Image (spheres, rainbow, N blue to C red):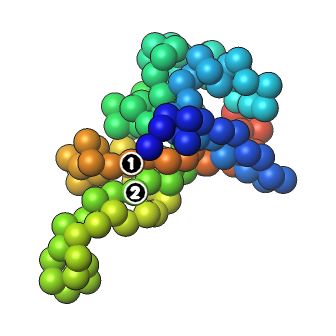
Amino acid sequence: MADQDFKYVIQDLTNVYIGARYTYEEMLEDDNIPHKLKEVIVRILLTEVAPDTTPENHIFYMTPDSASFKACKKMKARFKMSVWQPADGRKHKKAGYVNREYSIEEIVASKELHDKKDSTIVEEMHISKLGLGAIVV
C-alpha cells in the first residue's frame, strides 16, 4: 500500500479522523486539522518526539506517565488497527488480519500489541472533538 492511502483528514460533527501515516509536521501544515489539535501537537506531542514521527510509530513508544499519553487519553484517542492473528483452529480457523479499534489505554497497556507491532497495520487515529475541547494548552 502506498503511504498516501493513510494520509487524510475527515471530520464529522463529533470526531476527527486522521490517517495514521501523516507525520506531525504534515498535520501542522494541513488546513483541515483543527487549530486546537495543532496546539496540542506543538505544545505536548513535539516535546517528546521529532516532527517527522507518525502517530503509527509514536503510540508503541508511549508510557502511562508520558505527557503524550495523557493528552491522547484526554482527547479520547482511538486507533483503527489491523492485527495479524495466527490460526488457532477454534476461533480463528485461518490466519489473517483482524481489524479493530483500540483505545490509547489498551495499546499502551497491551504487551501483546507491542510484541506484534511489526506485523500490525495502524490505519487511522480517531479523536473526539469533545475530548479535544477538554484539553488545556
Q: Residue at coordinates 70% horizontally, 39% vertically from top-left?
A: 9
Q: Residue at coordinates 28% horizontally, 44% vertically from top-left?
A: 117
Q: Residue at coordinates 46% horizontally, 22% vertically from top-left?
A: 53
Q: Amino acid at mark 1?
A: Ile
| Disc ID at residue 121 | 1
Specify few, some or many for label 1: CA neighbours under 10 Å numbering under 14, 14-19, or 20 or more: some
Query: Where in the figure is residue 78, as x and y percent of width and height?
Result: 54, 50
Q: Amino acid at mark 2?
A: Ser
6 or 13, which is in the foreground? 6
Q: Quadrant of residue 84?
A: bottom left
Residue 50 visible, this angle:
yes
135 or 54, which is in the foreground? 54
| Disc ID at residue 82 | 2
Q: Are marks 1 and 2 in contact (CB under 8 Å)?
A: yes
Q: Is residue 35 above or below residue 81?
A: above
From the viewer's perspective, is 1 left or right of 63? right
Distance (Cα) linking label 1 and label 2: 5 Å
> Which of disc 2 and disc 1 is earlier in sequence?
2
In the rendered view of the protein, which quadrant contains the N terminus? top left
Q: Secondary structure at mark 2?
A: strand
Q: Tally the marks.
A: 2
Q: Residue at coordinates 20% horizontally, 47% vertically from top-left?
A: 115
Q: Quadrant of residue 75?
A: top right
Residue 36 visible, this angle:
no
